[in-house]
Image (cartoon, rainbow, N blue to C red):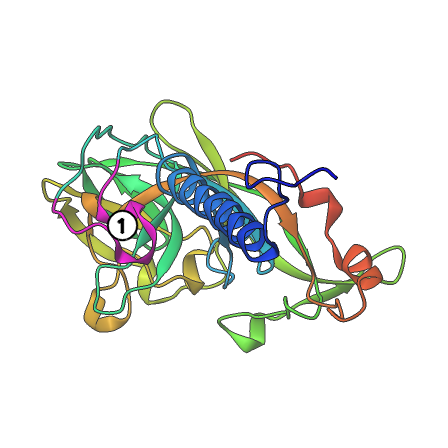
Amino acid sequence: MEIETAATAPAAPEVRQESSLRETTRFLLFLFIAALLLRSFIIAPFSIPSGSMLPRTMIGDYLFVAKWPYGYSRFSFPFGIAQFDGRFLESVPDRGDVVVFRLPAPEGQDLVKRLIGLPGDTVEMREGILFLNGSQITKTRIADYLMPISANTPCRTVDPAAKREVRGDNGEMFCAYPRYRETLPGGRSYDILDQTMGPGDNFPATIVPAGHYFVMGDNRDDSLDGRFTIMDGGVGFLPAENLIGRALVTFFSTDGSADYPKPWTWFSAARWDRIGKPY
């Protein structure tokens, strides 16, 4: 009769379970570290919570933010795991970049705006016209921006009397906003909305301090940005270390009509024409 030795005996169920648990734990830890490194150094997702950057971004847009273009600060890392001052591998942004940053305020959230002024630039607004280093920035009237009205994008206007809703050829409803094209020195252009004459349309000539930037929303009359102080709910001058990254591409967009327990509505709610748009 053959005698089963310790060397040939099958492993006990408890030993196999412990080995499987260790392997699973090791794999999950590897995934967590890989995701942490990816999110910290390469790319991170960001969702658009407001209409301050219309027409470039809409509520319900989800975009990827590139982390490497401007270098890294403690705000580049999630969960507050990094605690240091300044930036390393720092590069200066270009005027006109759409940037994501941490609001320089207690419990500050992440916001998205367009970078207008670099350190040493003089920024001024005169009756809705942007001046940079004493020169008027070209602002050209173009066709109205027709924003599709949906569950998460109502027709919001700063002046209720200026609200205009129009019907499309297929019966869909749009909110019409006056749209302009602004062109920065060097030729970089982008579209802005100018709804009315508001408190941000006049801003005294101010020099952007060293180590700071000046940001503005494209929806000029509906954006609390560098023209307003932190005490007024704005951004003020943005410290360079608060930059998180540059908007890269829209990877998903939803109009807010999806019923999430019903997966098939995710497709009907998607704004397919916005997906894949680079910044």
The N terminus sits in image quarter:
top right
Is residue 84 inside the magenta stretch?
Answer: yes
Quadrant for residue 161, please give it: bottom right
Of 72 and 94, nearer the camera is 72
Residue at position x 50%, y 73% in the image: 159
Of 72 and 197, nearer the camera is 72
Taking 64 as reference, is 107 left or right?
left
Residue at position x 33%, y 27% in the image: 185
Taking 57 as reference, is 272 left or right?
right
Q: Is residue 250 visible?
A: yes
Residue at position x 67%, y 42% in the image: 275
7 over 56 or under it: above or below: above
Quadrant for residue 91, please give it: top left
Taking 39 as reference, is 208 left or right?
left
Where does residue 87 sit, x and y in percent of width and height?
A: 18, 38
Q: Name the amino acid, label 1.
A: Phe
Taking 208 as reference, is 94 left or right?
right
